[in-house]
Image (spheres, rainbow, N blue to C red):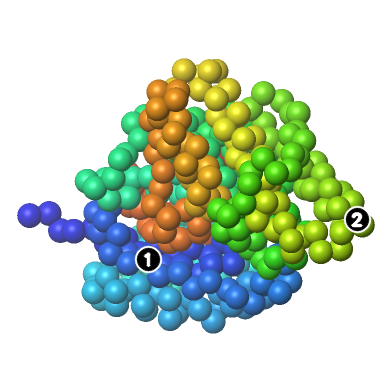
Amino acid sequence: MQKPIYILGIESSCDDTSASVVCDAKVLSNVIANQEVHAKYGGVVPELASRAHQQNIVPVVQQALKQANISKEQISAIAFTNGPGLMGSLLVGTSFSKSLAIGLKIPLIDVNHMQAHILAHFIDRENTKIPPFPFICLTISGGHTQIVKVTNYFEMEILGETIDDAVGEAFDKSAKILGLPYPGGPLIDKYAQLGNPKAYKFTKPKVGELDFSFSGLKTGILYFIEKQQRINPNFIEENLNDICASIQFTIVEILMDKLKKAVKKTGIKHIAIAGGVSANSEIRKKLQSAEKHFGWTAYIPKFEYTTDNAAMIAITGYLKYLNNDYADMSVATKARLKVTE
Ligand code: KG4
Ligand code: ZN
C-alpha cells in the first residue's frame, strides 16, 4: 500500500492564524485562532496582526498536529500562504514554515491565497460536490472580488474584478456606519434575517461588463443614514434589521447580476463561490435557487472553508505536491499576488 501523504498547511495572510493537516485531500484538522484585538478599531491593524500571529503560530500548529493525531516527523511537506496579504502577517507564516521545513528536512510549498480559496472546493472529494473544469468561481472576500474562469487546478483567468473596494469591505464599512464592530459582514447577515430586504433602495453601480465597484454604494449608504438620522436620531436602532436586509439584498443582487453576465459570456453554467463573503446566507440562497431558475449547477463551500483557513492552503499544497511543485528556500513573500500567478 502507498504511504499516506500528510500536508501541514499554514495560513497567516491577514488576521487569522491557522494550521491544518490534510491526508490525501481529507482534512484531519483545521485550527483557527481569530484575533479579537481588531474589533474595536473597525478594521485589521497590521502591526497588531503580525504580533498576534507571532504569539499564536506555535500553539496553533501544535494543536493541528495533535487533532490530526500525527507527529511532526510524519509530515510529507509544509504548504504556506506566500501572498497576497499583509506583509508583516505573511512573514510570520513564511519564516515559521521555512524553519520547520529545514528542521524536518521536508519540501516547502508556496501557496497563492486566492487560488486556495477556489481550490477549497476540492477538499474531501469523495463526500463533496466537486466542480468539473471549466467552472466559474466568484471569489468574494475582504480583500478581493473577482469572477474567475477555472480551467484546471492551476490554470485560471480573471474575467472581471472590483475597480475599488472589495465586497467584504462593502459589508464591513456599511457595518461600521451602523456602529457595528469589525468584521461586520456576519453581523449584517445576522440582522438581515429579521428584516425586510425591500425596505430601502440603494443605487447599484454602473461599471464595465464583469467588473465591480463598491465604493459608491458605501457612500450612498452613508449619506442615506446621515439624512435619516437628521430626521430621527434613533433611525439606526429602530430600523437595524431592515437596513441590514436592504444592504445585503443590494450587494447580493450586484453579485448575481454579474454572474448572469459571466454565464452568458462564457456559456459555462457550473458556478462556484469562494472566500469569506461566500459564508453569506443570502448569496448561498440565491445561488442555490439559480439551479432551478437558470439551470446552473451551484458549488457552495462548507462554512468552515469560506473565511480564511489553513485547510484550503493544505489542499492546494497537496495538489502541488502531486505535481512535485515545490518552493525554493529563498522564495519571497508577496503582499501583492494575482490569482493567475
Ligand atoms: O476570506 P476572508 O476570511 O478574508 C480575506 O481574505 O479577506 O474574508 C473576510 C470577509 C470580511 O469582510 C467579512 O466581513 C466577510 O468576509 N464575511 C461576511 C460573512 N462572513 C464573513 N460577509 C457577509 N456575510 C457573512 N456571513
Ligand atoms: Zn481570504
Please report the residue visible at 53 percent of the width from the left and 18 percent of the height from the top: 264
Q: Amino acid at mark 2?
A: Ile
Would you name the residue on which mark 2 appears?
231
Report the amino acid beneath label 1: Asn
Where residue 337 appears, as percent x and y from the top left, is 60, 47
Pointer 2 local density, CA inside 10 Å: few below 14, some 14–19, many at least 20: few
Residue at 74%, 64% (x, y): give it: 237
Q: Earlier in the sequence, mark 1 or mark 2?
A: 1
Image height check: is 159 above or below 315?
above
Instruction: Inspect this view and state whether residue 149 appears.
Output: yes
Q: Is residue 224 above or below residue 32?
A: above
Q: Residue at x 47, y 43 (%)?
A: 284
Residue 338 image point, x, y percent? 59, 42
Q: Secondary structure at mark 2?
A: helix
Q: CA distance from mark 1 to mark 2?
A: 49 Å
Please report the residue visible at 37 percent of the width from the left and 66 percent of the height from the top: 30
Q: Which mark is residue 95?
A: none
Q: Residues within 10 Å of mark 1 (few under 14, many from 20)?
A: many
Percent from the top left, x then y, of residue 108?
Answer: 40, 60
Task: Point out residue 340 in the picture as x, y percentages from the top left corner.
Answer: 54, 38
On the rendered image, what quadrant is the N terminus found in?
A: bottom left
Give me the disc on residue 30: 1
